Amino acid sequence: THTHTHTHTHAHTMSQFTTTASPKVLHFTAPWHPSHAQMSAVMTALPTAFPSLTFQSLPAETSPTLVNKFNVTVVPTFIFLLNDEVWSRLEGADPSELTRKVGELKEESFKLKGNDTNAAVVKEVKEVEKEKEKEKEEGEEGGIDEELRKKIQTLLTSAPVLLLMKGTPTSPKCGFSRQTISLLQSSKIPFSSYNILENDAIRQGVKIYSDWPTYPQLYVKGELIGGLDILKELSEDGPLSSSLGVPSVETIDERLGRLTKRSEVIVFMKGMPSGPKCGFSRQIVEILEDVCPKGYDSFNILEDEEVRRELKRFGEWPTYPQLWVRGEP
């Protein structure tokens, strides 16, 4: 699936550019740069989604001719070529912006090709346009207003490593989410998760906010890393924790401190607000629905035995549900 991604010396790339008819994305990088592993993984994953484009990663330091030709002054730099002319450029490591520009390049090339475009490409572009139109409608209907935007920002920065997924770690609702959980756990990376099936406004809003249409999505320190394909690529480059720049262990007290401060109001309960598993949890949900019009966060202690056991000690409170406000029980 990755036949479009190559690394060439500059002596060979010039002829490659002049003979390749398809639109191209050039990635000027350097192995020592912190973003190298992440953005190289994105570049390796993109050909699967955009088979009609050519992707090339080039070491900037050994490609002086091309660096001068395209006026590359920083790494990473991405050059987008259409008919061998510079159509656009992107400087810096931004996976969602890169993916957005690649999609635009494909659509632009389709318009120029017109009737010469084969049926498969026509179908592919129409599907992308249909998906974008659907997202636009959902965005307009759901309304990514300022309040929703703030909620999303708070959510994405609520943990050093956050996985937005379908279902929960112990009960994932799709294969991609299950594989991502397995990868993170086998890499011994502590993470928090958010079940996007619990809140459709968040589910649709994050797609627009991060310009990334599918789930699961992994965030590190509030920044989008990507989905399963990108994580797989990163794990092939060495320990996943190193590629993500996160520690592979976290003490239980550090985790509990982070969880209890995750939101201004958070209830640790049996079950979820949409399906409480005990009468006390059901009662507190009914109360919170009345007294917290702006919403509240929740954590299902039945999904995590360690949190269930240790939070009693941490908060010096022996039973559940437990209500925490601004990090205090």
Image (spheres, helix red, strand yellow):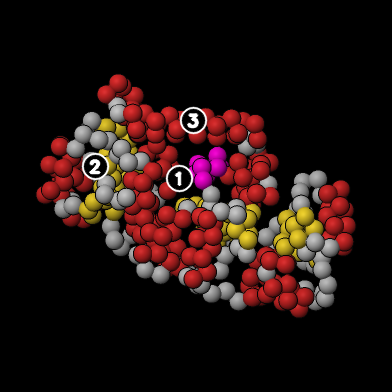
Label 2: few (<14), some (14–19) or many (≥20) C-alpha neighbours in 10 Å: few
Q: Which type of secondary structure does the marked residue at label 3 adopt?
A: helix
> Which residue reaches farthest bottom?
313
Q: Residue at x 57, y 59 (%)?
A: 162
Lower position in the chain sequence, tag 2 or tag 1: 2
In the displayed structure, 114 sits above or below 243; it is: above
Marks 2/1: CA distance?
23 Å
Marks 2/3: CA distance?
36 Å
Label 3: few (<14), some (14–19) or many (≥20) C-alpha neighbours in 10 Å: few
- Asked if one can make out residue 151 in the rendered structure from this viewpoint, the answer is no
What label does residue 130 carry, if any? Answer: 3
User: Is 169 in the magenta?
Assistant: no
Which residues, given as a range, are shown in magenta? 207-214
Report the amino acid beneath label 2: Asn
Q: State the residue in front, 105 or 216.
A: 216
Percent of width and height locating residue 119: 33, 28
In the displayed structure, 181 sits above or below 98; it is: below
Percent of width and height locating residue 251: 60, 76
Q: State the residue in front, 291 or 207.
A: 207
> Which residue reaches farthest top?
115
Lower position in the chain sequence, tag 3 or tag 1: 1
Q: Which type of secondary structure does the marked residue at label 2 adopt?
A: loop
Lower position in the chain sequence, tag 2 or tag 3: 2
Q: Residue at x 65, y 49 (%)?
A: 197
Q: Which residue is mark 1?
A: 96
